[in-house]
Amino acid sequence: MPTNGEATMKVFVTRKIPDAGLSLLKKEFTVDVFPSDRLPTKPEIIQGAANADGILCLLTDPIDSEVIAAAPRLRMIASYAVGYDNIDVAAATRRGILVSNTPGVLTDATADLAWALLLSAARRIPEGDGYCRDGKFEGWAPLLMVGQAVTGKILGVVGAGRIGTAMALKSKGFDMTVLYHDTQPNETLERELNARLVPLPELLQKADFVSLHVALSASTHHLIGEAQLRMMKPTAVLINTSRGPIVDETALIIALREQWIFSAGLDVYEHEPRIPKELLELQNVVLAPHVGSATIDARANMARMAAENMIAGLQGRLSPNCVNPEAYRKKSRG
């Protein structure tokens, strides 16, 4: 139970998170955790946040201007994710509400998953697994489950931030040539891998593997659409562990069905959690249920960081990972 002066403050947590974070919150505040093991609806979020001083939310929770307006006591929104495009940061800032995220702690976990998807899609691992489980395997054959080679090929990384950089650096073991596309040069990739910064069309045309690591914004929505998919090699593999709407899913389904590209590996979806039936029916796509950060270490560290952000914000300090420090300055002036 809380024992200090912040005991009267209430934090609404939209889903149960690891105890590494919950235990920290419970030492400082009254904590209300959404009780069901499912995504809360927007009305349920509004109800839970109505008397809350802080909201600790997931990337899947819509914390928009309506939710913010319905929470008059709200002072802090802590996202249990790196991304925060689900939060109306502008509306929060106008109210002097701090918003934070959890960068860094899930970098390697997500980069590792990108590689797991890349290898699985290139070598048709899930398809082969199903083939064996269905009792179809009758022995080695020259053309059975032939996939794409990885070693010595060209890796194209779209978005060279923390995760994109980590993903590219892991290509050393496969002796790959690395191309990357970003708004600015990445000295680490150029120094460690002799990587080249190139325009997106050039990357798409030359890369054997294209891995997406950009944040979702108006400029990156449908960054990969029909025109871009048609630029890619018919032997190319597309990997997306960033955000679903980065890719035009309708165009991707056609590209996979008509074999404009060889295969894809997806951890995120345009209208998540809904996955189109047409995508589920395709054999040349590997599907994961948004588990980029799903390691025991990463999820515990995310919970701890989100809780520390919340505690700092509600105790009047600038949260360590505040994404709108202008709200803190506004509150300090007020």
Image (cartoon, rainbow, N blue to C red):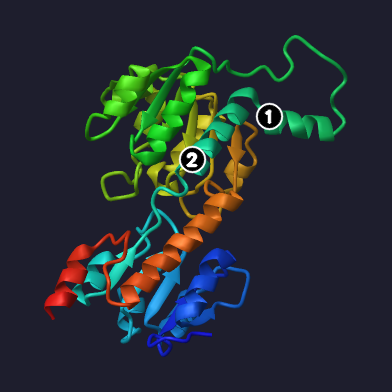
Question: Looking at the picture, which amino acid does disc 1 mark?
Answer: Ile
Looking at the image, is mark 1 or mark 2 earlier in the sequence? 2
Q: Within 10 Å of the Cα at label 1, are there few (<14), some (14-19), or many (20+) other Cα atoms?
A: some
Position in image of residue 207 (x %, y %)? 41, 20
The answer to whether 314 appears left or right of 28 in the picture is: left
What is the spatial separation of the Cα atoms under label 1 and label 2, in whole angstroms?
22 Å
Identify the residue at horizontal 83%, vertical 35% (top origin).
Answer: 133
Q: Which residue is mark 1?
A: 125
Question: Looking at the picture, which amino acid does disc 2 mark?
Answer: Asp
Q: Is residue 61 above or below residue 205?
A: below
Residue mark closest to the camera, 1 vs 2? 2
Q: Evaluate whether residue 182 shows in this view.
A: yes
Is label 1 in contact with label 2 (beta carbons under 8 Å)?
A: no
Q: Evaluate whether residue 275 shows in this view.
A: no
Q: Regarding mark 2 in the picture, which secondary structure is present there?
A: helix
Q: Which mark is drawn over residue 108?
A: 2
Identify the residue at horizontal 31%, vertical 78% (top origin).
Answer: 75
Tell which of 205 and 78 is nearer to you: 78
Position in image of residue 124 (x %, y %)? 65, 27
Tell which of 63 and 293 is nearer to you: 293
Q: Quadrant of the N terminus?
A: bottom right
Tell which of 92 and 25 is nearer to you: 25
Position in image of residue 54 (x %, y %)? 38, 77
Q: Is residue 201 above or below residue 302?
A: above
The answer to whether 328 appears left or right of 125 in the picture is: left
Position in image of residue 79 (x %, y %)? 41, 63
- Which image quadrant is residue 38 in? bottom right
